[in-house]
Image (cartoon, rainbow, N blue to C red):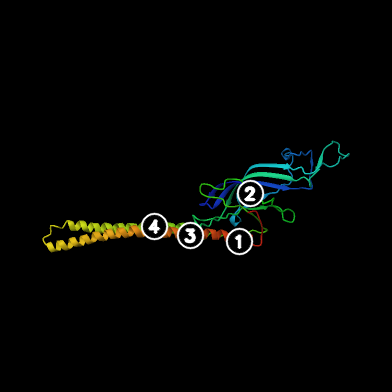
């Protein structure tokens, strides 16, 4: 499997879209071929349809993927010399055995696969999405999939506008169970939104307090013509005290708020990094336990 590109990662609909090239190679001992060329591209099969392996692509929860066939080409890879001449054949021909000359099927597909994104550490998350490939209409006693080399290769651009592909790996398993129930959980992005709301509310409260203290100063200044001079003086002193309090509150908040924001941002980043990195380690530790892994 060659992953040509990751066209789309849809967080809202929990799926991703990939352009892939599938290369299947197998032998069919029931077949014989005539006039094979050494160049595999000249050995296209179009006049008859032999048995072809049918693949199913599944996502998380064993949900069927949406597959669009873009291109398909079936050829024969000549790997042996022709059989000796047969005098019983009316027409002279170079005949090749099917068991020594494998069939090669190349298909380009657009696959939309479901993925249960764990957004608990968003936007610091590292997601692991699974695409299950299996043969249909056959049993492993007759036909089974074997990887060619690493089995999977990524040929596209790893860094996109929003996401970056870290690695791709093929794991061979007999039975797959990847059903993950959807649950409601608190995500880091929810914590971010809650902090933003609380901080904005706190700023509004402080502004109201400061404005209230300044308003009291204005009310006292408008009462300077009062008959009682002593009362006017006491209220003036109170007004000055309120103004000093307003300045002090403003000064303290200019120091406290940035400190609290810095502490929150540092803690948020550290927790998000540890949570995403820990989740990835646990996934791969479980995935490779007792299984034969292929690729990195």
Label 2 residue SS: strand
Task: State the CA–CA distance, disc 1 to disc 4.
Answer: 38 Å
- Check residue 94 in the rendering and tell me which mark sits there, or answer none: none
Answer whether labels 1 and 4 touch (C-beta < 8 Å): no
Measuring 17% from the left and 63% from the top, which residue is drawn there? 234
The disc, 3 or 1, on the residue closer to the chain's N-terminal end is: 3
Answer few, some or many: residues within 10 Å of disc 3's Cα (few below 14, many 20 plus, some between 14 and 19).
few
Task: State the CA–CA distance, disc 3 to disc 2.
Answer: 32 Å
Report the side of 80 relative to 22 (left or right).
right
Task: State the CA–CA distance, disc 3 to disc 1.
Answer: 22 Å
Query: Is residue 80 shown above or below 213?
Result: above
Answer few, some or many: residues within 10 Å of disc 4's Cα (few below 14, many 20 plus, some between 14 and 19).
few
- Check residue 197 in the rendering and tell me which mark sits there, or answer none: 4
Report the side of 118 relative to 57 (left or right).
left
Task: State the CA–CA distance, disc 1 to disc 2.
Answer: 21 Å
Q: Position of residue 41 (x, y in %)?
A: 71, 39
Where does label 3 land, which residue?
A: 270
Label 1 residue SS: helix
Q: Quadrant of the C terminus?
A: bottom right
Task: State the CA–CA distance, disc 3 to disc 4.
Answer: 21 Å
Where does label 2 land, which residue?
A: 153
Q: Nearer the viewer, residue 48 or 177?
A: 177
Answer whether labels 3 and 4 touch (C-beta < 8 Å): no
Residue found at the far top of this picture: 91
Q: Position of residue 122 (x, y in %)?
A: 49, 56
Report the side of 181 relative to 143 (left or right).
left
- Check residue 285 in the rendering and tell me which mark sits there, or answer none: 1
The disc, 3 or 4, on the residue closer to the chain's N-terminal end is: 4
């Amino acid at each position: 499997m060659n992953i040509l590109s990751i066209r789309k990662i849809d967080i809202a609909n929990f799926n991703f879209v990939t352009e892939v090239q599938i290369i299947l190679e197998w032998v069919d001992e029931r077949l014989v071929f005539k006039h094979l060329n050494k160049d595999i591209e000249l050995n296209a099969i179009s006049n008859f349809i032999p048995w072809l392996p049918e693949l199913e692509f599944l996502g998380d929860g064993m949900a069927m993927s949406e597959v669009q066939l873009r291109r398909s080409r079936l050829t024969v890879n000549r790997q042996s010399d022709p059989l000796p001449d047969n005098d019983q054949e009316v027409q002279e021909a170079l005949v090749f055995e099917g068991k020594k000359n494998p069939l090669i099927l190349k298909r380009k597909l657009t696959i939309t696969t479901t993925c249960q994104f764990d957004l608990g550490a968003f936007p610091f998350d590292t997601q692991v999405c699974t695409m299950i490939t299996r043969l249909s209409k056959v049993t492993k006693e007759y036909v089974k999939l074997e990887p060619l080399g690493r089995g999977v290769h990524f040929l596209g651009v790893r860094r996109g506008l929003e996401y970056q592909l870290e690695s791709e790996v093929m794991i061979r398993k007999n039975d797959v169970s990847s059903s993950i129930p959807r649950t409601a959980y608190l995500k880091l992005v929810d914590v971010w939104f809650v902090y933003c709301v609380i901080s904005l509310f706190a700023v509004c409260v402080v502004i109201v307090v400061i404005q209230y203290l300044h308003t009291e100063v204005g009310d006292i200044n408008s009462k300077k013509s009062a008959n009682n001079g002593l009362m006017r003086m006491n209220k003036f002193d109170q007004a000055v005290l309120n103004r000093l309090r307003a300045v002090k509150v403003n000064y303290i908040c200019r120091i406290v708020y940035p400190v609290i924001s810095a502490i929150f941002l540092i803690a948020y980043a550290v927790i998000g990094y540890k949570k995403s990195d820990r989740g990835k380690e646990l996934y791969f530790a479980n995935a490779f336990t007792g299984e034969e892994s292929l690729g990195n």
